[in-house]
Image (cartoon, rainbow, N blue to C red):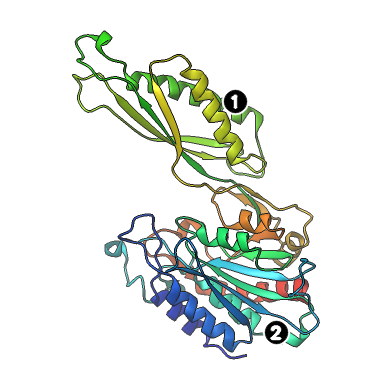
């Protein structure tokens, strides 16, 4: 199998911009990264599909398959096989806070610096390096490499993969930075807005208006009580913060101290535990607001600031969980940050999150990955491919 040397692949991936952002001035296509990966994977013997997103046709997913003649990659059932998956996009960056060019792989003190080194372009080069050690004729189950678009902003890439039902495999490893520790659970995230409308008027006479700001005080009190209830009935000791969280992150209302506030808006962030459903939480919040303002002169609306990402939980007895534990000597854990894992689990793939680098390097200036993690990552991926595809 042919592909560039590992460091060369890392250099080219880091040098290829693919920022995704909800702010249009920062948002970029990921096609140049996808095209790089496609070239290397074709040269390595994979069958490659590039799948533009219907929602954002300038961006694309990649699904590559390495399969032997006797495996079941073309069957409609997921009897086996492994997906190595990651996202191709990075977050925006503050160039003036970097010690070196974010788009140039820079070696310094045993570290490789560059935008996306940890989160998570390096994983693709390492996955290709590991896959190249296998002759496809020896594979009894298919090996997929999947590269998604827009994980850092919309999750549209993972959602498109889920809607298509690809790839047909039983297990998935998503190479987010976990310090090479297997993760089988993470919290979800949902961000909701609450907008109240009252009636403005001169502040000298309260009867002239209805204060949306004072009404929001009642909302905040009710939200804090709901948070207390959620945390009383939901707990998971596998997490460092074992309860679901709710953060009241943004509020704005009114325009002048001598006017009764006519409108007020609050934004909240919730991090539910596995087993908690986003739509059910939205339904409860809607019901609580409806009850709070029944027969009130305040009008209200609730809206989602993003689709949200569900929590993830893969059974502890799953073969990929036990395989990852055997290869690392570390029990599978839980993290608070979100990944594309829930979308793969929703397709019926049993999913583990595990990759080189650390999450505290993600989204930071001078992002890096340690050089001494490269070989162990390749060995770990080879071990998983051997266990789940051979």
Which corner quadrant holds the N terminus? bottom right
Q: Quadrant of residue 81?
A: bottom right
Choose between 72 and 134: the one closer to the eye.
Answer: 72
Q: Quadrant of residue 142?
A: bottom right
Marks 2 & 1, CB-CB < 8 Å contact: no
Q: Can residue 106 be seen in this view?
A: no
In the rendered view, tell whether residue 289 sits above or below residue 129.
Answer: above
Q: How many marks?
A: 2
Place of residue 254 in the rendered image (x, y in percent of width and height, measured from the top left): 26, 27
Label 2: which secondary element: loop
Q: Name, please, the residue furthest toward the bottom.
A: 2
Choose between 80 and 98: the one closer to the eye.
Answer: 80
Place of residue 249 in the rendered image (x, y in percent of width and height, measured from the top left): 40, 37
Mark 1 nearby-residue class (10 Å; few <14, some 14–19, many ≥20): few
In the rendered view, tell whether residue 357 sits above or below residue 15.
Answer: above
Q: Residue under circle 1?
A: 229
Choose between 243 and 360: the one closer to the eye.
Answer: 243
Place of residue 94 in the rendered image (x, y in percent of width and height, measured from the top left): 31, 61
x 72%, y 85%: residue: 136
Label 1: which secondary element: helix
Marking on residue 28: none
Which corner quadrant holds the C terminus? bottom right
Q: Name, please, the residue furthest toward the front.
A: 54
x 22%, y 17%: residue: 201
Left or right of residue 160, residue 103 in this image: left
Q: Can residue 185 be seen in this view?
A: yes
How far separated are the C-alphas under marks 2 and 1?
A: 52 Å
Left or right of residue 332, residue 296 in this image: left
x 63%, y 83%: residue: 46
Mark 2 or mark 1, earlier in chain: 2
Q: Residue under circle 2?
A: 134
Place of residue 203 in the rendered image (x, y in percent of width and height, measured from the top left): 21, 14
């Amino acid at each position: 199998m042919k592909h560039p040397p590992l460091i060369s692949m890392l250099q080219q991936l880091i040098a290829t911009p693919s920022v995704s952002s909800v702010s249009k001035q920062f948002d970029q296509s990921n096609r140049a990264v996808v095209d790089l990966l496609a070239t290397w994977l074709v040269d390595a013997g994979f069958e490659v599909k590039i799948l533009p997103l219907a929602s954002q046709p300038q961006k694309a997913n990649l699904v590559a398959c390495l399969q032997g003649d006797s495996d079941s990659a073309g069957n409609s059932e997921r009897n086996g096989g492994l997906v190595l998956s990651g996202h191709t996009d990075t977050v925006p960056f503050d160039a003036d806070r970097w010690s070196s060019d974010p788009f140039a792989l820079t070696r310094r003190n045993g570290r490789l610096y560059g935008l996306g080194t940890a989160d998570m372009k390096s994983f693709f080069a390492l996955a290709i390096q590991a896959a190249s050690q296998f002759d496809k004729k020896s594979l009894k189950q298919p090996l997929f490499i999947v590269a998604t678009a827009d994980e850092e902003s919309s999750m549209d890439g993972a959602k498109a993969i889920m809607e298509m039902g690809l790839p047909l495999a039983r297990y998935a490893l998503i190479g987010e930075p976990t310090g090479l520790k297997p993760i089988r659970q993470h919290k979800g995230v949902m961000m909701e807005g609450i907008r109240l409308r009252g009636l403005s008027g001169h502040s000298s006479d309260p009867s002239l208006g209805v204060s949306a700001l004072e009404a929001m005080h009642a909302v905040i009190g009710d939200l804090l009580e709901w948070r207390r209830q959620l945390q009383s009935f939901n707990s998971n000791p596998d997490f460092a913060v074992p309860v679901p969280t709710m953060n009241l992150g943004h509020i704005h209302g009114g325009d002048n101290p001598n006017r009764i506030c006519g409108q007020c808006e609050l934004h909240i962030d919730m991090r539910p535990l596995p087993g908690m459903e986003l739509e059910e939480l939205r339904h409860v919040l809607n019901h609580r607001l409806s009850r709070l303002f029944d027969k009130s002169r305040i009008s209200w609306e609730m809206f989602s600031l993003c689709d949200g990402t569900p929590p993830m939980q893969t059974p502890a007895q799953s073969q990929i969980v036990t395989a990852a534990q055997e290869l690392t000597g570390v029990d599978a854990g839980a993290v608070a940050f979100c990944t594309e894992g829930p979308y793969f689990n929703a397709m019926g793939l049993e999913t583990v999150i595990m990759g080189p680098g650390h999450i505290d390097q993600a989204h930071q200036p001078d992002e890096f990955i340690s050089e001494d993690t490269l070989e162990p990552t390749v060995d770990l991926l080879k071990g998983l491919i051997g266990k789940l595809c051979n």
